[in-house]
Structures are given as structure tokens and as C-alpha cells.
Amino acid sequence: MLDQLYALSSAEDLFAFLDLPFDQAVLNRARLHVMKRMGQYLAETDLDQLDDAAVRAAARDALQKAHADFENSTPRAQKALKIYTQPRGNVVPMEGLRLSVQ
């Protein structure tokens, strides 16, 4: 089952394979984020201990939850990618500063 999932070439193929409806506008806006979030949800499950039907159910649930996360939210608000959790540019957070006495 995992080999079949890995062999799919697009998010749309994944939704079709798992028999899930999706909003094309959500995928157009947050495709990479939805896939990343699905992977995060799947990482919470030990797939090696599951049979094919259970792996399919876990993948289906993870993809459905990931898609739902971005239906009414933005990638920036969801912070699914590392780029949204790192400081931007040369900005140093105030809590990172210490008073230096010489």
C-alpha cells in the first residue's frame, strides 16, 4: 500500500486513489502545505504495524484532516512549513538579547 501511495505523482492522484473529495482552490493555494501536513499526521502512526487496509484508512484520514486544515486558513497561519516558523531576515527577537556590562 505504501509503495502505491509513493508512486502517485500529484495531490489530485492521491485524493482519487483514496476516494476523497477535495476543493481544487485549496490545492491551488496550499498544495505543498496540505501534503506536508498529511505527512506530519501520518508520522504520528506506526504504519509498519498496520495491514494494507489500516494503512489506507490512516492515509485517508490524514489527507482529509490536512485538507480541512487549509479550507478556511492560510499556509502562513497554519505554519506547516519550516519557513513560517523561522525568524525572517536579520531580525533578532528581543528575548534573544542580553544586557552586556563591560
Image (cartoon, grey):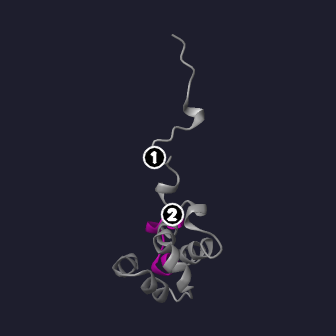
Q: Residue furthest right?
A: 72
In the figure, is residue 71 to the left or right of 2? Answer: right
Of the pair 1 and 19, the residue shown nearer to us: 19
- Asked where in the image residue 73 lies, by quadrant, the reply is bottom right
Residue 67: x and y in percent read 57, 76
Type of the residue with mark 1 = Gly
Q: Distance of mark 1 from mark 2, alpha carbons?
A: 26 Å
| Residue under the image location 48 percent in, 60 percent down | 81
Check disc 1: other Cα within 10 Å, few if <14, some if 14-19, many if 20+: few
Q: Is residue 3 above or below residue 47?
A: below
> Is residue 64 rendered to the left or right of residue 82?
right
Give the x, y percent position of residue 37.
Answer: 52, 67
Q: Secondary structure at mark 2?
A: helix
Depth check, mark 1 against mark 2: the one in front is: 1
**Residue that carries the numbered disc 1 in the rendered image:** 89
Residue found farthest to the front: 90
Residue 92 higher or lower than 86, as above or below: above
Position of residue 80 relative to residue 18, above or below, is above
Q: Main secondary structure of the magenta part?
A: helix
Q: Nearer the viewer, residue 60 or 71?
A: 71
Please give the residue where the numbered disc 2 appears in the rendered image.
40
Counting other residues with Cα less than 10 Å from the Cα at mark 2, is it few (<14), some (14-19), or many (20 or more)? some
Q: Which residues are magenta?
A: 40-56
Counting from the top left corner in percent of width and height, residue 18 is at 50, 85
Task: Quadrant for the N terminus, please.
Answer: bottom left
Q: Is residue 95 magenta?
A: no
Q: Nearer the viewer, residue 71 or 50?
A: 71
Tell me which amino acid carries mark 2: Gln
- In this picture, residue 56 sits left or right of residue 2: right
